[in-house]
Amino acid sequence: MILSEASRDVATGTTRSTIWGGLAGVVMAACSVFDIGAIDALVVRAAEFVNAGASTYVIEAPQLVDGKACQAIATLAGFQAGAMREEPATVATLLPSAPIPTYAVTDGLFDLVPAIEDLGGTGVLASAEVADSLGIMPGGSIETSSGPVRVRGVFSWPPDGRRRGLAFALLAPEVSAGRFDECWARRTPPQADMSGPLLATLLPRAVEDSDSVSLLQLNPSLGEQLNGARSFAGRPSRWAWCISLGGCLMVGLASVRARRLELASALHLGVSRGQLIGMMVLEWAWWTLIALIAAAIASAWAVVAGSGAAPRALADAAALVLGQGTAGSLIGVALGGASIRERALFRYSKSR
Amino acid sequence: MRAVLRGVGHAYPGGNPLFTALTVTLEPDRVYGLVGPSGSGKSTLLAIVAGWLRPTYGRVERNGIESVRWVLQNPHGVARRSAIDHVALPLMARGLPRRRAQAAAAALLVDFGIGSTADRQFRDLSGGEAQRLMLARAMACEPSLCLVDEPTAQLDQHSAAAVSQSLAALASKGSIVVVATHDPQARAACTDIIDLTDHAPT
Ligand SMILES: Nc1ncnc2c1ncn2[C@@H]1O[C@H](COP(=O)(O)OP(=O)(O)OP(=O)(O)O)[C@@H](O)[C@H]1O
Ligand SMILES: [Mg+2]
């Protein structure tokens, strides 16, 4: 009887599924899209922080860094690391007046200095500025007095506050583990105190000669820390799920209160409160399904239109908002069902 | 089963008494016509009989009255549901499966002269048809006490006669029926008359 009555209410339009489903859908979609946008902005900011080198730390100790120990940091979970050593500058025949600073680096350093394009194979990575001034593309080569040097790729080194020095430079990969000048390392998620692993890469002599050792942040312009967890917890949309819950609760309540007279009269005719709430909940399930489909489509659109950096986190946020909205509308319907009074019928009649 | 009113009178707070010293015994299989001019307190007395309002004076004894159903002045239903669904609902609430409830509801609609409206939506019924639907629906409940307020106020002569007959039929099913009315035809269909003018305070 409950199912049969509820389905007739839906089929005849008595439930007004479009109105309630539409309203709840708009509430859930708005909260979800708002939160997705806010979280995505944080994710983008975190990626910028990392890409700018703000989470990368460098230990400088000329000729006192153990390349093998430095590469070993990269084997720790969440760490990337590589070593670097200054070499004699390269003099291009095309540009004899400007010798190009050249650095020998271990493989891991390329994780920290991402290439715009890298064909792989042998050869050096040229900074975009070098490639521009010599008019070379990856795959081409630089003519020098000691013969051609193949350029396997190009990296960018924008002036965004990161340590200067690589804007006009060549990076030459070196397999052999020897002595280096610097070790670079970063952790994901970012960690500001990298001194532990970095100090461990120093050769014994450096520990005595501590004046020549310094530890610095590759790009200090964005601050020392990106407190991802704190800014996530403090984002303006952090209450989106509450608004979804509260808003949908109101919608659920309204969907029942709008029918209070016919429901009061059903109670008066001998329909039990349990039967009444049963019907309301079945009808709720129908219009909430409509709301969920609408809100899920809107959320999916927001995730797809976003940066794509962390779709999983965005989907989780949307799921929370939609879940709370669903719970809220159900609570609203239940409260509404419990609030219907048979006497409302009599009061209504008297007030006419 | 009966309801006894002993010396009942009522005044709303701050108002003069509407009626006083009303003593009457209400029994099944009778239709009590409650008459009196507008504002004499007919609707008020119905609420007192139902037990929804405490009388200012006297008392009401109710024996064996298990269920009370109202038919109110303004017919109200579910706009988009069919007429027959309105009558089937109380039958199904009492445990009848839909098909049997639907059949019994159809018969009730015929009793009230609105058999042809069975599949029409409530919002498409005329005021008279809607009021007869309310009576049919109350009958479906087979209540101990059926209180009807101005049932024929909105009906044409022909429907009013049909409704009056059906009220008697409800009484013959074992309900106590009290009908507040202005309509002489409905009044004539009643077996007993309670005239509030006889109980107006002097
Ligand atoms: N809740 C209330 N509080 C105060 N006064 C009320 C209340 N309900 C009704 N009255 C007054 O009591 C008087 C009787 O009202 P009632 O509705 O019982 O009369 P009635 O005989 O049913 O009238 P009608 O024929 O117009 O339906 C009216 O003057 C009305 O204004
Ligand atoms: Mg009245």
Image: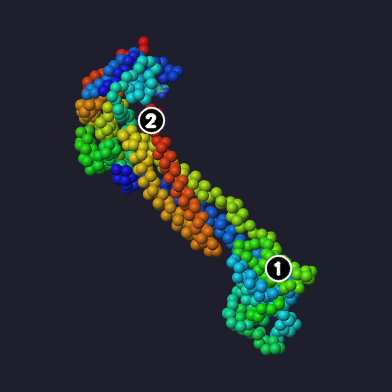
Which labelled disc corresponds to residue A343?
2
Residue sitting at x 40%, y 41%: A256
Q: Quadrant of the C terminus of chain A?
A: top left
Which coloring applies here? rainbow
Q: What is the chain letter for disc 1?
A: A
Q: Are marks 2 and 1 on the same chain?
A: yes
Determine the image quadrant of residue A68: bottom right
Residue nearest the observer in this picture, B10 or B37: B10
Determine the image quadrant of residue B75: top left
Q: CA distance from mark 2 to mark 1?
A: 80 Å
The three-letter code of the residue at mark 2 reads Arg
Q: Position of residue A16 (x, y in %)?
A: 38, 45
Q: Position of residue B95 (x, y in %)?
A: 27, 39
| Quadrant of the displayed image that contains ligand 1 | top left
Residue nearest the observer in this picture, A213 or A251: A213
Say whether residue B151 is visible.
no
Check if mark 2's residue and mark 1's residue have beta carbons within 8 Å.
no
For this view, does A192 lie left or right of residue B72?
Answer: right
Q: Label 1, on which residue?
A: A199
